[in-house]
Amino acid sequence: MSELPDGLHEFLADSGWSDAAIDPIPGDASFRRYFRLHRPNCEGAMLMHAPPPEEDPRPFLHVAKWLSDHGMRAPEIIAARPEQGWVLLEDFGNDRMRDWLDLHPEGEQSAYEGAIDALVELHRRPPGPFSSYDMATYQREAGLLTEWYCPAQGLNVDGDGYVASWEAALAPMLPRQARGVTVLRDYHAENIMLLGDPATRAPQGLIDFQDALVGHPAYDLVSLLQDARREVPEELEAAMLARYLEQADAHDDFAADYARLGAQRNAKIVGIFTRLYKRDGKPRYLDYIPRVWAAMERDLKHPALGPVADWFTANIPDELRRTGGGTIT
């Protein structure tokens, strides 16, 4: 067993879980760590350690409460000591959507239908008490590509032109997200838990939502349907987008905004995955970049992305674009 964090046993004792067996489970791309707890003759629980100063669990607790209060399936919070990074929460089990689909590919349609329906329900709620997804945030995220990916490829690019191209592409969209919906920001098959019988589109548990903002309803759709970590066939993407539009009150420019946010999010992810390798020594994320790059290239074909597409043509060599971003060393 890997070394347990200081303070774990004290927190469990204060929470009434001192007799629990502790099973560390793999973490994610952050500093967070997770442990599955088991007690005799009792349901288990999940322990999250999000240690300061690198992590702060208070946003997670804030969003979890809002989601639960509004009828969404966030995990129940059993106990928390946020100043030390400890959160004890409901265990949603083992049926993470991505893992379940690896074993049950025939259930892909129903699983994605359930994920779309959950988003429809979320978007019918009033937007949460969260910060707005504004231009500065979109620009900061898109800028991760020029901050990390371009230097890693030895590219000397037009940084000011990059910012200006995104300003031109995204500005028409901002008025359409004025009312806004709660945007979970990392809504994809690794962060959706299938509860009950996955084949019947049972309620889906939400995790990893601590960065929620109020923004455009297309953002989480892009996150789900242009998944960096799992191949989503283009036909399924189109069918699920149509399913969402059948149920939602969407505007005429929704397809254009979907492409805008697809390109923006995928540019961000290319930058993040490069950073995870160059700064944090996590090379496995490089394997996902070709998939992300391919989705971004599809998004850039939409006329709404004209300024950004022109920038890519002028600044990113064709060879890198054809090979899904090229090899990063």
Image (cartoon, rainbow, N blue to C red):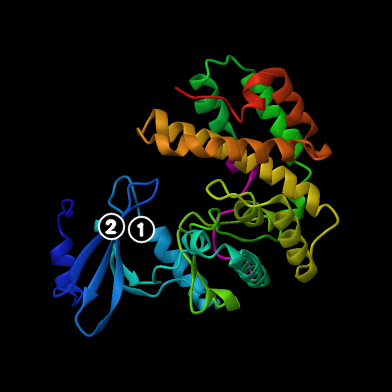
Q: Is residue 42 above or below residue 48?
A: below
Whichever of callouts 2 and 1 sits on the residue coming sooner in the sequence is 1
Q: Give the amino acid type for the residue marked by disc 2 in the picture.
A: Gly
Q: Is residue 5 above or below residue 300?
A: below
Q: Is residue 216 above or below residue 41?
A: above
Q: Residue furthest right?
A: 252
Where is mark 1, residue-wise? 57
Magenta-colored span = 126-137
Which picture quadrant has residue 82?
Answer: bottom left
- State if disc 1 and disc 2 touch (CB < 8 Å): yes
Tell me if 15 is positioned left or right of 308 in this view.
Answer: left
Where is mark 2, residue-wise? 85
Q: Say which quadrant the N terminus sits in.
A: bottom left
Position in image of residue 309 (x %, y %): 75, 29
Is residue 48 a member of the stretch shown in magenta?
no
Position in image of residue 236 (x %, y %): 70, 57
